[in-house]
Image (tube, rainbow, N blue to C red):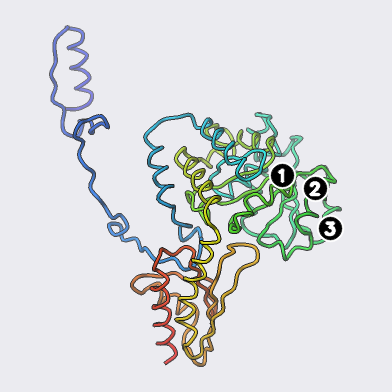
Amino acid sequence: MQRRELFRRLSFLTLTGGAVSLTLPASAKRPAAASDPNPPAPLKRDLFKELGIRTFINAAGTYTAMTGSLMHDYVVETIQDSSIQFCMLDEVQDKVGEKIATLVHSEAAVVTSGAFSAMTLGLAGILTGMDQKKVEQLPHLESTDMKSEVIIQKAHEIVYNHALKNTGCKLIYVETREQLEAAISEKTALLHFLNIEADKGQIKHEEWIAIGRKHGIPTSIDIAADVPPVSNLWKFNDMGFSFVAISGGKAIRGPQSAGLLMGKKEIVAAARLSMPPRGFNIGRGFKVNKEEVLGMYVALESYIHQDHDREWRQWEAATAVIHQAVKPIKGVTAEIKVPLLGNITPTLHIGWDPQTVKLTGADLQQRMRNGEPSIEVGDVQEKHIAVTVWMLKPGQEKIVAARLREELTRAAT
């Protein structure tokens, strides 16, 4: 029955007071409701296999292209449990933000859709304050009294600084303190710092903050992947940065699409004017649902309180398994190093003499990728790769060790 014909008959019967019993086509019948006593059980599906998507053992690290990290069961359960009730999104962010702020020693906090959006939103809050008209004007700064420049050290120039350009601001790069002082003007909205490159810039954290305070300019820091150590979650808030941006889907193992904006109360409050559920702003596309907000909170809370010394010993033991498997191979060198600033975990660097081991890093990467099971490695260079164990499931270090030994031994003979 056509929809138009159905409405015509219903209208006629209503007008004439007649009773009606209609049999709708199968396609028009409603699905089983949650309250049905015996709803049909959903089929268990392996969508990775069904869609032909390759899965792999992650010995490379928390790369977004590799879908970050894996959420713990309790985070997944939180997401599932919170998905069956309605609530007001702002209330969720209010209550969760209060709890997170206490955990990370900040005046305020809000769950964002990653560190990138936290940077955009934090700067937006600085530019607009609580002025709704200014919120709606971003990223069009022309003919307004909003500031329009962000100063960054040249050593901290990375693609993710585009998050700051999203507000309409221009990025000004400097190298020395003298250049920084000279670049500061009435247009300067923010002094931005990149923690993972802190050893490369001439101006260090404390001096950067002090210069900002001297000129009355807010300071921010990007620590997207810089946990562990867990203390970094509050170190930079305690240090005095105006806002801090971090990813949630890496070591914290929250939702991959979540992050945190932590900082001064007035900045976070103003940033939220550029966040959903509000529209007509540059942050409308940075939507975070209630499930992600609550999942991020549970992940953060659990991460802070877990036994990090025990976790480190487990990483060392798993790394040693791979180290012992590859170091006896002729022509191969292997060394465990710990990065100084970001992804601070035991990392095994494997190199080789190309005269003895006849393959390149790209060759080894491809062989590991194409094997069974598929394995991803990191830091691929001409005669070098690196592997980390912190994203491995228990026991997978033995698989990685065996496969690396197999491929390197084959190439060395």
In the rendered structure, which disc, 1 or 2, sits on the residue that comes first in sequence? 2
Q: Amino acid at mark 3?
A: Arg
Query: Is the residue under label 2 in contact with that under label 1 (CB below 8 Å)?
Result: yes
The location of residue 165, given as percent across then percent down, is 66, 48
Closer to the camera in the image, 332 or 119 = 332
Q: Amino acid at mark 2?
A: Gly
How far is mark 2 from mark 3, CA to CA? 12 Å
Q: Quadrant of the C terminus?
A: bottom left
Residue identifier under label 1: 242
Q: Amino acid at mark 1?
A: Ser
- On residue 177, the disc is 3
Closer to the camera in the image, 103 or 60 = 103
Residue identifier under label 2: 212
Q: Residue at x 20, y 8 (%)?
A: 15
The location of residue 176, given as percent across then percent down, is 82, 61
Q: Residue at x 51, y 86 (%)?
A: 332
Closer to the camera in the image, 388 or 19 = 388
* Lateral position of residue 23 relative to residue 60, left or right: left
Q: Secondary structure at mark 3?
A: helix
User: Taking 340 as reference, is 268 above or below it?
Assistant: above
Q: Quadrant of the N terminus?
A: top left
Q: Residue at x 41, y 75 (%)?
A: 368
In the rendered structure, which disc, 2 or 3, sits on the residue that comes first in sequence? 3
* Lateral position of residue 152 relative to residue 257, left or right: right
Q: Secondary structure at mark 2?
A: helix
How far is mark 1 from mark 3, CA to CA? 20 Å
State the image quarter where residue 340 is shown.
bottom right
In the rendered structure, which disc, 1 or 3, sits on the residue that comes first in sequence? 3
State the image quarter where residue 49 is shown.
bottom left
The location of residue 89, given as percent across then percent down, is 50, 32
